[in-house]
Image (tube, helix red, strand yellow):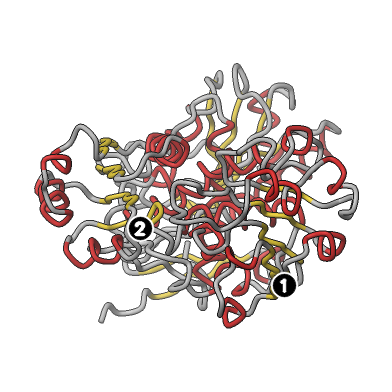
């Protein structure tokens, strides 16, 4: 079976950001993810596509959801996966990132999935090693698989991304999820608005082609998708808003505020949720919420990413 | 072929057709239609993408496009007829067998192909064959269907010289 001419083929061994991807590459990943979604619904939830491949999870920041999601994805593809976390490894003994990576590579690992607190760490690593590198979040730069799974979920619910009105709410400044969403959504033709307190919106964000609003109540009524970002207290150095309560009053999606939105709006959140801050419990568990779909789709999207990057030529 | 399948199976009971992406799917759809008009019984049709089960996955230069697999019926105890357009080395069928057993344990698996062109590399044979076409190894057989290619035809062509 020959693929028709003009179809995109994946050649990257690394996935470092959505910024570097073409529209066609994003669409290919989404298409593969759609095919992979069915695997998780089978009785035997496994295909032999990556049999004999080794994938390393290298997490220098705490994470349960993303790490587990990558682990499940790798296992559904029959790859072997090993987990390294920074605490309890030699990093805590002062080993440098490139030394850690080279040691992992010396064990013939095919793909390294890395999360790191420094922006650009994934790209640095990709230049150091022959293995593929998948960025699972680097500082405040990007979190490409989260961006892809958000877009996948929007597409699944709203059928197409072109022309979709998406509002990213909250801490845009510290959010790698926001950046990956913006790059991907703009490439696929969505209309993106970012909304949050002025202190948490970077000053030149308009250059990415998004609209900026500081008043959620004014823009909420015209959105198809509300992607609510987490208030990352661990990343905020300084006071960006007077108090959590005041933030919740201005930008939290409460039972009252959700009534101003379109009836068919979907509410997304990358997790973990600060209940009662960004989202009220009723909204998080309500009919508009697709938060658990995001988790399910995350596995399919990460399967697609691991499949294509691991199969690419080294 | 539809008559043959019905005859061998003594009716349409317990039959499931599974087409291999992409042209096997078209053929399976047509067989299901014929079976319906002959035996007036609806036979479920599944779709299988075997790319994830290929034994040469790590060796093909271009990454395959992964299509959907959709088998909505329980295969347990069923008589599954695998359907593909061309039977050649048999490796596709081996992959398909691996894939199928992940969906359950059919009572029996049969193979139906439109064209058998020989050159098997594995001990695999078809149960229902549209036509045997003896070919040489440097030829390539294309099956075209109205649904995919605007016309029904089988083309035997010379393989492009390797550069």
Decide which of A297, A288 is in the foreground and name it: A288
Residue at the (68%, 28%) spot, across then down? B73
Residue at the (38%, 50%) spot, across then down? A306
Residue at the (61%, 56%) spot, across then down? A241
Chain containing the residue with disc 1: A
Decide which of A215, B51 is in the foreground and name it: A215
Which type of secondary structure does the marked residue at label 1 adopt?
A: strand
Q: Callout 2: 10 Å neighbours few (<14), some, many (20+)?
A: many
Tell me the distance, in whole angstroms, between the alpha carbons under discs 1 and 2. 29 Å
Q: Which of the image's four quarters has the C terminus of chain B?
A: bottom left
Q: Which residue is mark 1?
A: A191
Of the residues under marks 1 and 2, which one precedes in the sequence?
1
Residue B17 placement: quadrant: top right
For residue B123, side relative to residue B130 (left or right): left
Residue B128 placement: quadrant: top right
Q: Which residue is mark 2?
A: A309
For residue B76, side relative to residue A252 (left or right): left
Residue B40 vertical position relative to residue B32 in the rendered view, above or below: above
The reply to whether residue B29 is visible in this rendering is yes
Which type of secondary structure does the marked residue at label 2 adopt?
A: helix
* Circle 1 or circle 2, nearest the eye: 1
Residue at the (33%, 62%) spot, across then down? A14
Decide which of A164, A160 is in the foreground and name it: A164
Point out the residue furthest to the front here. A242
Residue B148 placement: quadrant: bottom right
């Amino acid at each position: 079976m020959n693929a028709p001419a003009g179809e995109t083929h994946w050649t990257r061994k690394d996935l470092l950001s959505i910024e570097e991807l073409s529209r066609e590459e994003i669409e290919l990943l989404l298409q593969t993810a759609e095919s992979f979604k069915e695997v998780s619904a089978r009785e035997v939830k496994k295909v032999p596509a990556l049999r004999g491949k080794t994938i390393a999870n290298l997490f220098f920041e705490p994470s349960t959801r993303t790490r587990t999601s990558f682990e499940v994805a790798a296992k559904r593809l029959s790859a072997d996966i090993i987990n390294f976390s920074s605490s309890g490894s030699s990093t805590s003994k002062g080993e440098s990132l490139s030394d850690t990576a080279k040691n992992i590579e010396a064990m013939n690992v095919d793909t390294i999935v890395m999360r790191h607190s420094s922006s650009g760490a994934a790209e640095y690593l990709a230049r150091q090693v022959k293995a593929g590198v998948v960025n699972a979040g680097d500082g405040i730069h990007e979190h490409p698989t989260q961006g892809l799974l958000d877009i996948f979920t929007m597409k699944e619910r709203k059928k197409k991304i072109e022309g979709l009105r998406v509002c990213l709410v909250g801490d845009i400044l510290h959010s790698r999820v926001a950046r990956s969403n913006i790059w991907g959504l703009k490439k696929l033709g969505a209309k993106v608005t970012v909304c949050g307190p002025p202190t948490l919106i970077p000053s030149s964000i308009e250059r990415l082609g998004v609209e900026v609003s500081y008043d959620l109540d004014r823009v909420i009524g015209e959105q198809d998708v509300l992607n609510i970002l987490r208030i990352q207290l661990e990343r905020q150095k300084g006071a960006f808003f007077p108090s959590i309560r005041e933030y919740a009053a201005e930008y939290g999606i409460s039972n009252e505020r959700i009534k101003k939105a379109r009836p068919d709006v979907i509410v997304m959140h990358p997790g973990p949720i600060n209940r009662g801050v960004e989202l009220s419990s009723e909204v998080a568990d309500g009919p508009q919420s697709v938060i658990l779909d995001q988790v399910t789709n995350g596995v399919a999207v990460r399967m697609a990413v691991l499949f294509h990057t691991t199969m690419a030529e080294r | 072929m539809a008559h043959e399948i019905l005859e061998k199976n003594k009716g349409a009971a317990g039959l499931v057709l599974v087409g291999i992406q992409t042209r096997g799917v078209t053929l399976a759809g047509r067989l299901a239609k014929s079976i319906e008009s002959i035996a007036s019984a609806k036979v479920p049709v599944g779709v299988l993408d075997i790319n994830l089960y290929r034994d040469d996955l790590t060796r093909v230069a271009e990454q395959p496009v992964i299509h959907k697999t959709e088998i909505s019926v329980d295969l347990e105890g069923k008589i599954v007829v695998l359907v593909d357009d061309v039977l050649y080395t048999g490796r596709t069928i081996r992959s398909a067998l691996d894939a199928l057993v992940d969906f359950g344990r059919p009572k029996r698996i049969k193979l139906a192909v439109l064209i058998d062109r020989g050159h098997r590399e594995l001990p695999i044979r078809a149960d229902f064959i549209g036509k045997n076409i003896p070919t040489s190894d440097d030829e390539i057989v294309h099956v075209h269907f109205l649904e995919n290619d605007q016309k029904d035809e089988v083309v035997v062509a010379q393989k492009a010289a390797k550069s």
